[in-house]
Amino acid sequence: MHHFRKVPTLPELAIRELSASVENKQILKGVNLTVRGGEIHALMGPNGAGKSTLGNVLIGHPNYRVTGGTIELNGIDLTHKTPEERARAGLFLAFQSPVAVVGVKLSTFLRTAYRQVHPEDKVSLQQFYDRMKVHMKRVGLDESFMSRSVNDGFSGGERKRFEILQMVMLRPKIVILDEIDSGLDVDALKLVADEISEYYNDEVGFLIITHYQRILKNITPQFVHILKDGRVAVDGNRDLSLRIEEEGYDWIKNA
Amino acid sequence: MESEYSKDAEMEKLLEDLRTSGIRKEDWEFHDSHKPTYSTGIGINRKVVEEISDIKNEPDWMRRFRLKSLEIFLAKPVPTWGPDLSGIDWENTNYYTRPDEVNANKWEDVPDEIKDTFTKLGVPEMEQKYLAGSVAQYDSEGVYHNLKKVWEDKGVVFMDLDSAIREHSDLVKDYFCRAVPATDNKFAALNGAAWSGGSFLYVPKGVHIDMPLQTYFRMNGEATGQFEHTIVVADEGSKVHYIEGCTAPKYDRNSLHSAIVEIYVKKNAQARYTSVQNWSKSVYNMPTKRAWVDENAKMEWVGGSLGSKVTMLYPSSYLRGPYASAHNLNVSLAGPGTVKDTGAKALHLAPYTSSRIVAKSISIEDGKAIYRGLLRMNKGAIHSKSHVQCDALLINDKSQSFTYPHDEIYEPTATFGHEATVGRIGTEELTYLRSRGLSEDEASSMIVLGFLDDVMKEIPMEFAVEMNRLIKLEMGKLGAVG
C-alpha cells in the first residue's frame, strides 16, 4: 500500500560551495547553507567575514563575481541570473544600507515592483495602496512617505522600516535580512520584529545576517551559523548565538 | 491622497505605455517622396533672397528688410564661443524649398504624401483631441492652418506668418522683429533674409484660450534650411498656451534650422510657450527665442530639447514692466555624439520683477550637455529676484555636463540664487530597484522620469508620454546602462 503525500511546495534556497570575489578579492570561499520554508536561520560572524557579501551575491549584485558553486531556489539555478529574475523567483534582501533613489516615488516604485513579482495578481492600484497603508502603519511609517522619493532624506531607521514594508508587500519566499536592527531604537525594533513575525510562516524561509545577537532576542532562530573568513565555520542552534554574546568570535577556528 | 492616487494612476499608465510601446526611430525619421515644386537651389545671396521675396509677392518693406538682413548675416562671423559649428555647410544648403502650392484649411485638401506624413506623426489626431487650432509647416511653407471657430469669433488670429502678412499686415508690422532684430546674431540675421513660414498668433485683450494652439514643423528634404518666424502676441489680460513640435528625417548631409520666435506678453497677460524639439541627428538647431514681458504679465517657457546634432538655444525674457515674471523649464537630452548648449536669459529691467529658471539635462554616452545662462538685474529693478537651478544626470562615465551661468547685477536690492546638482545613474541605485523585480530598462526609466518629475508635471500629458518614449528609445539603444 502506497502512502500518498501532498508534494511539498515549500521553498528551498540551496547554497552550495559558493565562492565569490569583489574587485578581484576573494571574499567567499565555499559557503554551504540551506534555508527552507518555515525555517529561521541566523548567520553571524565577525566583521569582514563576508556576511554582507553573501547577501549581495545571493541577489546578483553586478559588482560581485561568483567564482564557484551554485545558488538554487526550488531547484532552479539562480547562480547567473539577473537581480530581477531572482526577485521574481521569490528572493528578497533587506539591505544593510539601502540607497536613496532621488525622484523615484516610493508608492510608484513599490507598485511597479509588485506587478513584476506578482504579474498574476490583478489587484487595483487603490486596493494595493490601501494594503500598503495598513502595513505602513504597522511598521511605523507615516502615510506621507508614499509620495516621497525612495529612501531620500530617510533616517537610518526609516530606511529599515521601508525595507520591511517592501518585504511584506512583495511577499517573497526567501528573505535575507542584513543587519536589519541597525539604526532602529528599541521601540522601532519591536515594531519591525513584530511585522517580521507576522509575515513568518511555513512558506517563507529567513536568513538573518547579524553581527550582534540583539535582533535574535525578538526573533528566535532555529539554526545559527557562524561565518568566518568566507566559510561557514560552525553550525548550531540558539545556544550558539548565546555563546557568541558571552564570548565573542575569538574562540572559533577557521573552517 | 486622491490627487496623489490619480497622479500615480497616470504614472502607472505611462510606465505601461513605455513597456508596450513599439516606437522606433523610423517612426519619424522616415522621409516621404514628395518632390518640391520649387527651390532656390543651393547657397544664399542677393539673388536668392530677392527670389524668395518675389515668390511671396511681399510688400516692399519686407523685401528691404530681407536684403538688409542678408548684409548683416554675411558680415557677422560664425560664433566660436560655443559648440563647434564647422559642420554647417553654408554653401550647399538649400535655403528655400517649396512644397506643392497649397495652404489648406482642411486636411483632405492637403496633398496625400504630405498629409500622410503629418498623419503618421499624429498631428491631425492631436488637433482634434487637444487643440484650439493648428498650423502645419512642411519644409519652407505652411501647408495647413485651422482655428476653431469659437476662437476666430473672439478675434483670435492664428495662421502661418506669410498669410498673416497678407491678411493682417498692420498688426504684424507692429511686432515683426521688434524683440529680435536682425542685428541680434548671425542666425537671426539669416532668418531675416531667408525666413519663410512660421506662425502668427494674436490673442485679443481679455481673451483666455483654454486649449493649446500648436504648430508642427517638418523638414523633409536633405541639406535644407528651415527658417520659420513665429510671433505670439498675448494682448492685455489675455491667456494663451502655444505649442511647437518639430521633427525631420535622418540624412547623411546636415540641415540647418534657424528660427525666430518672438513673444509679446502685454500688461496682465499670461503666455506659455511649449516646444518639443526632436530633430534628427543631422540637424543644426540654432533658434533665437525671446519674450517681452510687460507689467504684471507672466511668461512661461517650457522646452524639451531632445534631438538634433547641435542645439544652441537660450529663450530670453525681457521683464519690462513692474511685477513681470518669467519661468523657464527646460529638459535637454544630449544623446550619443550630440551637443546641447542650452539655457535661458532673464533681463530684469523694471522693479519687482522675478524669474525662475529650471534646467535639467541628461547626457548619454559621449553626449555633452551645457547650461549657459544670463541673468541681468538693471539698476532700478528694485527688489527683483531670480532663482536658477541646473540639474544634470549623467548616464555612464563618458557623459559630460557643464554649467556656465553669467550674472550681471547692478541693483543692490535685487536677490538671486543658483543651485546646481550632478548625478550619475549608478550601479547601486539600479541594483536596488532591480533587486525588487524591476527590469534594468524599467529601473533606468524610473530614475530618469524621477529626475524629470518636476518638469514633467508642467508638460501636457501627451507630450510627457512622447518625451518619455524618446528618452526610453535613446536609453534603450545603449543596452546596458550604468
Image: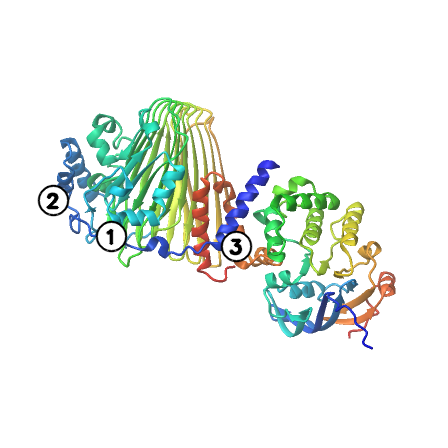
**Side of B194 relative to B7 (left or right):** left
Please, what secondary structure does the residue beneath circle 1 have? loop
| Residue B195, image x, y percentages | 22, 40
Residue B444 tag number = 3
Q: Nearer the viewer, mark 2 or mark 1?
A: 1
Taking depth in this image into account, of B388 and B17 the one nearest to the observer is B17
Q: Nearer the viewer, mark 3 or mark 2?
A: 3
Which residue is rendered at x = 31% and y = 47% of the image?
Answer: B118
Tell which subunit mark 2 falls on.
B
Cα distance between the residues tagged 1 and 3: 35 Å
Reading the image, the residue beneath label 2 is: B47
Say what amino acid the circle numbered 1 marks: Gly
Which residue is rendered at x = 79% and y = 50% of the image?
Answer: A194
**First of labels 1, 3 by sequence position:** 1
Q: Is residue A173 above or below residue A71?
A: above
Residue at the front extreme of this rendering: A1
**First of labels 2, 1 by sequence position:** 2
